[in-house]
Image: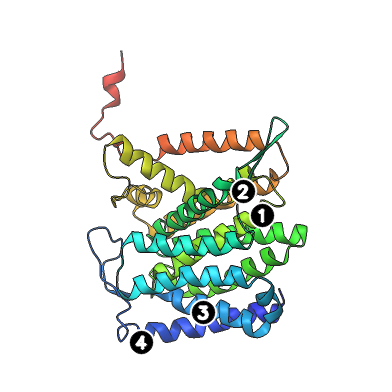
Amino acid sequence: MSIDLLTSIFILSLLSISVLIHYSKRFGLVDVPNDRSMHKKITPRGAGIAFVLSVLFTIIILDFSHFKTYYYIYFAIAIVFSVGVWDDITSITPKIKFIFIFFAVLLLYMNDFALSSLGVYFGFKLVLPAWFVLPFTFFAIAGFTNALNLMDGLDGLAATVSLVMFIAFFAVGLQYNDELLMILSSAFIGTLLAFLVFNWHPAKIFMGDSGSLTLGIVVSILAVQATHYIAPAAVLFMVALPLLDTFIVMTRRFQRHKSLFQADKNHLHHFLFNVKGDTRYTVMILGSMQVVFSIIGYQMGKENELLSLILFCILFYLYLNLFDQRLKRRTGYDISQNKK
């Protein structure tokens, strides 16, 4: 991607987000705090409308040949973006969101863009049956899109974690000279840097579902594309934090016999925020974790895929036990009671 294109996206995103903040109340794009909110005052939302349109508009105008080559990718992104905008304007059910995501995945599948292999294990390539490719791809993309959406709980968190993942995929694209990986990831690097100017704590605006759902589908698309060059198990590390967060929350709800889709405050950012009560600290720690995971995934790209998968499972086990809301800090403990 040229510096001119990246700079244009950054500047246009800054301007469009500024305008959206000014007119947010007129369009009903405001977030009113509730019992699950981490913020305490009414805040503009829907910044995704501004920064996603900035990316799409700039690419179409300045690099139409790229857009024409990968039109189905951008149409799939637009489908998910549209349902995110709908949800920002008037809340809709998760079922409707999944329907839109399914049609986006179907469009990708019809253009031979799907997960058809899970890698090589014990010398054998694990190829999915043809009938299973579409449902598995939908499960993977919809699952991750929802996972990233759930991480949008603190000022700057979803944008910071996404920024790290985009940088990792740009590195893969640069190494293997993949146009889609380089252009799509760098475009969102530029727009997220602009968004973070307004979203860093204390946030002047939230990205809304128009932002988080779109980021989720874009990262998913980049992850699928990256499997052409590096092991699928290694890609798991590049998108590790949202996956671990969702896996842990779902496991906790299952253990407590609660609905897997019932909203709660058991996410990783809730746990860390409760420890210190500092939003910026929490975001920096989680962002740093994703940096480490991305580096591991990048370095293990061509290593034994079974080893990568085993390491990811160990990572899940460790996080499941470390980030447990049931752990209580002991108070009033007298060490002298332990003396013999």
**Which residue in the protein does label 2 denote?**
235
Q: Are marks 1 and 2 in contact (CB under 8 Å)?
A: yes
The answer, for residue 56, to whether it is visible in the render is yes
Q: Is residue 302 left or right of residue 28?
A: right
Q: Amino acid at mark 4?
A: Tyr
Which is closer to the viewer, label 1 or label 4?
1
Q: Say what secondary structure mark 4 lies in.
A: helix
| Marks 2 and 3 in Cβ contact (< 8 Å) | no
Q: Earlier in the sequence, mark 2 or mark 3?
A: 3
Residue 168: percent from the left, percent from the top? 64, 57
Q: As shown in the figure, which amino acid type bears the numbered disc 2?
A: Val
SS label for mark 2 = helix
* Residue bearing mark 4: 23
Residue with the mark numbered 3: 53
Residue 8 horizontal/vertical position (percent)? 62, 83
- The quadrant the C terminus occupies is top left
Residue at point 70% right, 78% down? 3
- Residue at disc 3, secondary structure: helix
Residue under numbered circle 1: 226
Kindly identify the residue that appears in the image at 64 percent across and 33 percent down.
307
Q: Amino acid at mark 3?
A: Leu
Dot 2 surroundings within 10 Å: few (below 14), some, or many (20 or more)?
many
60 displayed left or right of 252: right
